[in-house]
Image: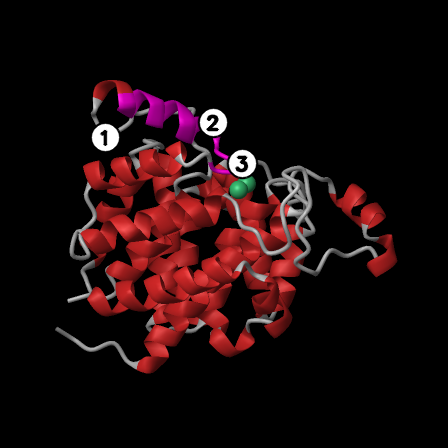
Amino acid sequence: MECASEDVLARAEAAYLGLALGDALGATVEFMTPREIAHHFAHAGGVHREITGGGWLRLKPGQVTDDTGMALALGEAILAHDGKVSSLACARAFDAWMRRKPVDIGNTVRRNLLLFRRTGYPTAPPSEHDAGNGAAMRVLPVALAMLHRSEFELREACRMQAHVTHNNPVSDAASEFIALAVRDMVRGDSLREVYRRRIQPLVDEQPAFAFRGKPRRQNPSGWIVETMQAVLQSLVEVGGFENCLVDVVNRGGDADTTGAITGMLAGAMYGRSALPARWLKALDPEVYLRCCQQARQLASSTP
Ligand code: MN
Ligand code: MN
């Protein structure tokens, strides 16, 4: 058993808090267009940059949505199974989460969890239509639980959790990329290294994800391709944790989910000290605590 260093644990924690912060920040402007955001936040220079709740879900300030909720459910299931990822444990955890009447839930997630309830079979049927971002947004605990395992094992575990609701190769490419990139950065790699080892190969293998030299991706939908274009443009082209997150959520569209995914990547990359104190203060205190605890437990459970 390798003992994770404090640096690694702090970056794991920053990734988990980054996910929750991006979700809470983005949810306020989910499904708005950049024009609507600029108009609505005219009093603040036309930019949304505070965690204030509201939005179409009428959230309390600091409240998170399904992105963080499903990640926490997945993380608990992994910890309850000694750091192992199993389809059935994931399906049961997501189903129990759905029964707790979450504030929001994706269509593909709901449809395939209802199918699991009927059949007891934890893997969704393959579907070319199920290329939403719902599996990618919750993948973080898998990356943290498998910090020192082989790339093959990590990819396999990513697909196991993803296929409970999204059995789709484009969704898989994104989920596996996110898990590998977060893991590299939690272990200390720079954006430069992650670009060469993960981002460039992702775009080479799945040209739909190309984002460099493309027009700014505005109004990214829940389709994983548009989600990832927005996330990667903000992550690669904007410097600093706060700027990155503000940039991505002000694109509007599926802003809580682009915020959540950018937040986990930028959190791992910029570290715990880069998370704005005023955002951490605004975050739901119970969510804050659960993210910190799970991050440390998952990252130190890795054999
Ligand atoms: Mn959400
Ligand atoms: Mn969303």
In the image, 148 versus 74, the foreground residue is: 74
Element under label 3? Answer: loop
Q: Quadrant of residue 55?
A: top right
Q: Measured from the top left, where is residue 158 in percent x and y?
A: 28, 47
Residue at mark 2 to residue at mark 1: CA–CA distance? 17 Å
**In terms of sequence position, does the residue under pointer 2 or pointer 1 come before the other?**
2
- Disc 3 C-beta below 8 A from ligand 2: yes
Element under label 1? Answer: loop
Q: Is residue 11 left or right of residue 115?
A: right
User: Please, what is the three-letter code of the amino acid marked with disc 2?
Assistant: Asn
- Tell me where the magenta segment starts and ends, as one range: 102-117
**In terms of sequence position, does the residue under pointer 2 or pointer 3 come before the other?**
2
Residue at mark 1 to residue at mark 3: CA–CA distance? 23 Å
Residue at 23% x, 56% y: name it.
Answer: 79
Q: Measured from the top left, where is residue 31 in percent x and y?
A: 66, 37
Which label lies toward us, 1 or 3? 1
Q: Is residue 1 left or right of residue 231?
A: left
Q: Which residue is mark 3?
A: 222
Element under label 2? Answer: helix
Q: Which residue is mark 2?
A: 107
Q: Which residue is mark 1?
A: 122
Residue at 29% x, 54% y: name it.
Answer: 142
| Residue 181 falls within the magenta-colored stretch | no
